[in-house]
Image (cartoon, rainbow, N blue to C red):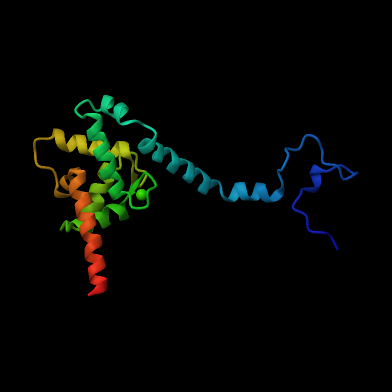
Amino acid sequence: MEAISYHRRQDYDSLGQRKSNVIKDENEIDLLHRTYCADIFSQRKQINEKRLLLTQVSDEAYAKRFPQWEPDDIGDYKIQFEIFDLNCDGLIDFKEMNQVLDEFGEPSEEEDRLKYFKEIDLDHSNSVDFEEFLLVVSKLQASSAPGTSIGNIVAKGAKQVKELRRMSVYKQLTNGLF
Ligand SMILES: [Ca+2]
């Protein structure tokens, strides 16, 4: 009967010494893990990079790229973005947008929301990152025509959205109690 070993036989010489050309701490389990988790790791990396758009790029840097706004405005948009980003991964996915619009009492159909969401998801990643979010807001503000109702809600002030969320939590609490 063979002993169970996570180490690869080919990494050892006939004396049982680990060969010197073998990367240390690399065993079969590590390899399997890396292969099977590659998708998860790359997804995680992507999420982290998107998250950095929110946390590592300063309000001042964004204000330079969007000269119509002051750094303070960018800070407000970050708060607003975070209200939509319910799981705090630096991305707004459709489910999150849908839920926040529901809380707003926005009457649009899910089908229209999805169409709108696909329009603002510029890189077709099935999520809206902070840069895409700023582009939406700037586009809506620049256009003199009234935007779609969904667009207007997305572009509304952070304060209002925050207020609504607080109300909704209050409602949930009172519904549970009375
Ligand atoms: Ca999210």
Q: Residue at x 12, y 35 (%)?
A: 143
Which quadrant, please, contains the C terminus? bottom left
- Establish if 15 lies above or below 174: above
Query: In this orientation, which residue lies closer to the viewer: 124 or 167?
Result: 167
Q: Residue at x 14, y 49 (%)?
A: 149
Residue 42 placed where, x, y %? 50, 43
107 left or right of 43 in image: left
118 left or right of 21 in image: left
Residue, far left: 145
Query: In this orientation, which residue lies closer to the viewer: 110 or 80?
Result: 80
Q: Is residue 150 visible?
A: yes
Residue 112 placed where, x, y %? 20, 53
129 left or right of 42 in image: left
Residue, far right: 15
Residue 113 placed where, x, y %? 23, 53
Which quadrant, please, contains the N terminus? bottom right
62 left or right of 44 in image: left
- Number of numbered callouts drawn: 0
Q: Is residue 111 visible?
A: no
Q: Residue at x 20, y 55 (%)?
A: 164
- Establish if 6 lies above or below 18: below
Residue 160 placed where, x, y %? 17, 48
